[in-house]
Amino acid sequence: MKKFLAELFGTMFLVLLACGSAVLAGPSIGGYGVGVCFGLVLICLCYAIGNISGCHVNPAVSFAMLLSGKMSAKEFGLYVVAQMLGAAVGAAMLFWFVQSAPGFNFGGVTGENTLATNVLQPGATSYMALIVEILLTMFFVFVILGATDEKHGFGKFAGLAIGIALGLVNIVGIPVDNCSVNPARSFGPALFSDGNAWGDYWIMVVGPLVGAVLAVVLYRLAVNCCCKKACEK
């Protein structure tokens, strides 16, 4: 239950604060600023709940842990449910906040009742967004696997690497589709959108999950290669 609640609250805060930065100050801080906010929020969460649940707050990360044998299928299912619920609660709070002041100029609202949803930006195509989501998630999850590896990781500094990685991928991906790399992060705001977000939602699920699979494969190759070289010496 502790892990379940930690993932629920962690994902709630990720959506509320990180997406909230885009809603409240998108034009003034730009994509770079929003990306930094995503990274900083995740760094804080890593050190707040990392020792409880591992601070996945992302179904793609949990999927990678499942494939790596670090969690059971049952635990994976519970994590995903918690993450989706947390994202929904965080988005509901953000929606309630926006509705409390209809006259306020919320910079990140790109359409009626839209809360920093993951939608294709002008000129972007579904194919382009899918590639971006796969590649950025692959990098993000690869960093997580390396930073948290019991043998090769960096212990207490893992949270910094993971948060910085999320910030970087958001800075790169925001111009394409507001950057997801997290099906739960996309799910919450979409619930309170004007409906446009659901047409692109499949990209925010397929892309991150495929990226997670590739990250696991690449990390296993990297570790096996290193182990082979060490044995040869």
Image: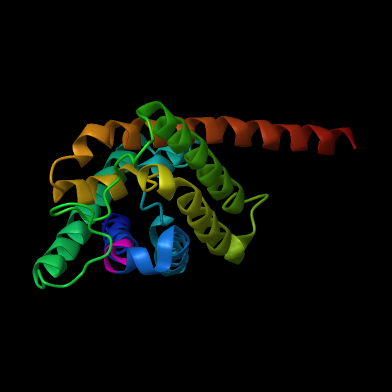
Say above or below: 21 vs 171. Answer: below
Q: Which residues are magenta?
A: 20-24
Tell me the quarter of the picture where residue 106 sits: bottom left
Q: Secondary structure of the magenta portion, mostly?
A: helix
Residue occupying the point 83% across, 39% down = 230
Tell me the quarter of the picture where residue 22 sits: bottom left
Q: Residue furthest right?
A: 233
Residue occupying the point 40% across, 34% down = 129
Residue 55, x across and y down, in percent: 41, 57
Residue 16 colored magenta? no
Residue 189, x across and y down, in percent: 22, 51
Task: State the residue in front, 89 or 32.
Answer: 32
Colouring: rainbow
Which part of the image, by quadrant, shows the C terminus?
top right
Report if residue 34 is visible in the image.
no
Residue occupying the point 13% across, 54% down = 113
Residue occupying the point 28% across, 39% down = 77
Q: Is residue 34 left or right of residue 86?
A: right
Say above or below: 212 vs 163. Answer: above
Say above or below: 93 vs 181. Answer: below
Residue 182, x across and y down, in percent: 36, 45
